[in-house]
Amino acid sequence: MKKTKQITASVISAAHHVYNEPRSLEYDDDRVLVKVERGGICGSDIHYYQHGRAGMSVLKQPMIIGHEFVGRIMEAPSGSPLKIGQCVAINPSQPCNHCELCREEKQNLCRNMRFMGSAQFFPHVNGGFADFVAVNPHQCIPYSSEAEAKTIAFAEPLAVAIHAINQAGDLTGKKVLVTGAGPIGCLVVAAALASGAAEIVATDISERCRTLASQMGASLTVDPIVTTTTGQWQENGGYFDICFEASGAPAAIASLVGFTRPKGRIIQLGMGATHVEFPLGLLLVKEIELTGSFRFINEFETAVRWLENGQVNPLPLLSAEFPQRDIVYALETAGNKNLAAKVQIIF
Ligand SMILES: [Zn+2]
Ligand SMILES: [Zn+2]
């Protein structure tokens, strides 16, 4: 049976203007109706807003933005273990579960992925920046009502960070470098610390970002412009066991091969530059592994648990919060790297 609910949604047009719009949400009764409470603005939301595209995903039609959000259950299908009033984090991933990659348990790489708030495929998949959304029951990850919504709203970016950690293998006792201390880089720092890394260095050209990285657990932060320090990392074949590239900056990407020990691993998380000059010869003679990291699989549940039990405290990263009516101002603030790390919307 189809149901209808009047909602207010934050929509981005193909010309990348953002506005709040009354809509009627139509959903089947096997869906869960969630009253959205909080949503975090992600780098991809900012890219859509500023450029009409995020990486290779280009806006071609109006789409509700947002994929980092939490809320409370208003309606659940009969027979579902989900309860009315329950606090839930919403996993924005909707893999097809049929394709070859899904069957190989690589659902993050699903060719038919319906990721909420993403223009990767056409038609685009609406996101969660609305006062109500209808989702699949398995997208709802309940969390304790004692945890704060503003904390659990970091589940999606933390899941991205934990997936990157899992791409790196065992971090116990390892020396780790994170280039780029935006929200993702800082969450990688926190996740690496929680995963037993012995030493975690973070680099960023912004002093504000370096301070945040320290608060999130970096043992040392460095301005990459200061070559006296970065030069030392290249001595004796390289210093770090594992490097996480979270800036997307060509200079950072090219520098990591020099900083990494032979047989070390580089995990690429930062989007941005699509073509980069890369010291391939050095990668070859040091047998360095270069690995991409995209979204997450089961790490979403792990992220909810880590936030719920305080294993990671993301709140130093929360710079500002705005009511939904100020969505444009919130995006402007989030897009100004001198002002803000994570910005959240209250619905
Ligand atoms: Zn995100
Ligand atoms: Zn699939």
Image: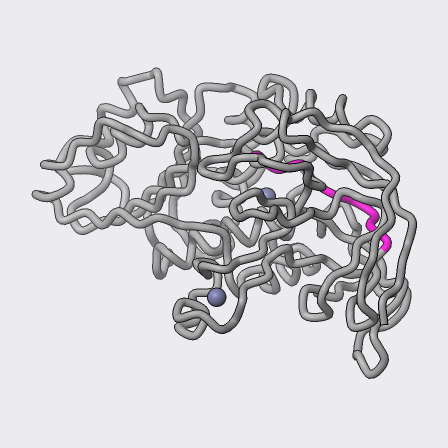
User: Residue 160: image x %, image y %?
Assistant: 51, 50
Asked whether the viewer can see residue 145, the reply is no
Query: In the image, what residue occupies the spot 57% across and 28% down?
Result: 52
Taking depth in this image into account, of 121 and 231 the one nearest to the observer is 121
In the rendered image, residue 227 lying in the magenta stretch gets the answer: no
Question: In the shown orientation, is residue 275 left or right of residue 315?
Answer: left
Residue under the point 62% across and 35% down: 45
Residue located 25% across and 29% down the image: 254
Q: Is residue 236 left or right of residue 244?
A: left
Residue 132 position in % (x across, y down): 84, 51
Query: Relative to 102, does residue 55 appear above or below in the rendering?
Result: above
The answer to which quarter of the image holds residue 304 is: bottom right
Give the vertical position of 44 relative to 147 (above or below): above
Q: Main secondary structure of the magenta part?
A: strand
Closer to the camera, 157 or 128? 128
Task: Looking at the picture, tell me which residue is in the foreground, 345 or 168.
Answer: 345
Measured as percent of width and height from the top left, residue 213 is found at 52, 34
Q: Is residue 25 left or right of residue 182?
A: right
